[in-house]
Image (cartoon, rainbow, N blue to C red):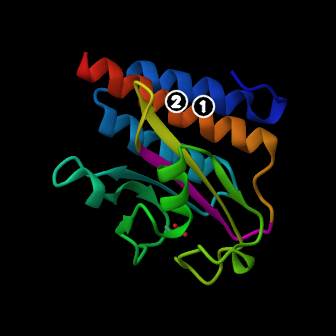
Amino acid sequence: MPQGAKLDNVLQDLDRLARASGSVEDLMWEIVKLLHDRLLKYNWVGFYMIEKSGAEQSRMLVLGPFQGAMTPHTRIALNQGICGAAASTGKTVIVDDVSKDQRYLACSTETKSEIVVPVFVHGKVVGELDIDSHFHAAFGPEDRELVEYCAQLVGKQLEKSQA
Ligand code: SME
């Protein structure tokens, strides 16, 4: 579990949510609400999940549970955006200044920085957790650990639900 005093309560609450949630969808809603409400620089928080039908090479990321303003990007190709980069490489992407990243798909003119963390099920990327901030370089090492922890909770619940 990630360390850091300021996040301890959030982490405890996440674990409680993971134990209590009725379904993976419920857990995803609880996570986006908790992160959006409690982490003041997390101004848009949402999951994108890779669609399950259609030819594998043309599957897209589809907007799932989210908190924040509605985004024009409800479907994103795996070769587009920061979201597509994280899903296609299976690696966390942190962008400190989105205006300097050619890949960035604008969601809000207020967004200054972004983190996208893949969600894995049995080692395969099935989706991701995307967070935008109105502040430059909002996502440091502790944030990365926290968001990766959230993505792992969802991945584990998905594995359990498919067992
Ligand atoms: N900025 C993302 C698109 C999703 S919105 O931020 C909600 C991207 O570049 O992929």
Instruction: Kindly identify the amino acid type of the residue bearing the numbered disc 1.
Output: Tyr
Q: Is residue 63 visible?
A: yes
Where disc 2 sits, the SS reads helix
- The reply to whether discs 1 and 2 touch (Cβ–Cβ < 8 Å) is yes
Residue 133, placed above or below residue 1: below
User: Which SS does the magenta portion mostly show?
Assistant: strand
Quick check: 128 left or right of 21?
A: right
Q: Is residue 21 magenta?
A: no
**Magenta segment boundaries in residue numbering:** 127-136
Q: Is residue 87 left or right of residue 77?
A: right
> Can you tell me whether the CB of the residue at mark 2 lies under 8 Å from the nearest atom of ligand 1?
no
Q: Secondary structure at mark 1?
A: helix
The crowding category of the residue bearing disc 2, from other C-alpha atoms within 10 Å (few below 14, some 14 to 19, many at least 20), is some
- Direction left: furthest residue: 54
The 10 Å Cα crowd at callout 1, few under 14, some 14 to 19, many 20 or more, is some
Total tally of numbered discs in the picture:
2
Query: Circle 1 sits on which residue?
Result: 149
Residue indicated by mark 2? 152
**Which dot marks residue 76?**
none
| Residue at horizontal 55 percent and vertical 35 percent from the top | 150
Q: What residue do we see at 38% from left, 67% from top? A: 76
Residue 9 in the image: state x and y as whole percent.
69, 29
- Determine whether 43 is above or below 13 in the image: below
